[in-house]
Amino acid sequence: MGADALVRKVLEEVGIRRERYDLQWASAAEAPRFVELITKFTLKMKELGPLGEAEGLSPDEVKERLKKALDAVSNQRVRISFGNATKAVRKDGVWTRDHIDEIISTKTAKSLDKALG
């Protein structure tokens, strides 16, 4: 869940709608759930349109922002702050999405700001 929170945070920071990323779990024994998850996500993407359209970005702007996002998550300081955030989550032992999002956001804020320039 921690990596999930970081991806959502970085996408938000570079101006890509969070709805374009959704990580859900379905086991091999849950075929109907898998179909439901994929169907809902596909419908959501059709509603948003091509990447960049709902965000008001040109294809070149999308490429630039995604490159910036990739560079940010590859940044050593961001990776270290993310590691510290995951340690804090484990220490707290609170596994709700809101709590994890808050810890990841707080612990990575400075390094992400610097990496995203």
Image: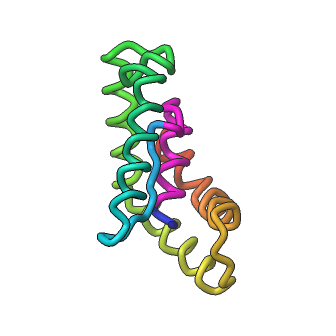
Residue 35 or residue 47, whichever sits in front: 35
Residue 96 falls left or right of residue 46: right
Q: Which residues are magenta?
A: 4-19
Which residue of the protein is positioned furthest toward the front in this rendering? 32
Question: Residue 57: x percent and y percent?
Answer: 44, 16
Q: Give the dominant element type of the magenta stretch: helix, strand or loop.
A: helix
Residue 39 quadrant? top left
- The residue sitting at 43% across, 64% down in the picture is 25
- The residue sitting at 63% across, 75% down in the picture is 95
Please, is residue 7 above or below residue 65 in the view? below
- The residue sitting at 43% across, 49% down in the picture is 36
- The residue sitting at 36% across, 20% down in the picture is 50
Please, is residue 69 above or below residue 1 in the view? above
Residue 116 or residue 35, whichever sits in front: 35
Residue 32 quadrant? bottom left
Give the colour scheme shown: rainbow
Residue 34 falls left or right of residue 16: left
Residue 81: tell me if it is visible: yes
Question: Residue 112: x percent and y percent?
Answer: 53, 50
Please, is residue 25 above or below residue 44 in the view? below
Question: Residue 11: x percent and y percent?
Answer: 48, 40
Residue 117: tell me if it is visible: no
Q: How many marks?
A: 0
Question: Residue 81: x percent and y percent?
Answer: 52, 66
**Residue 43 lies in the magenta stretch:** no
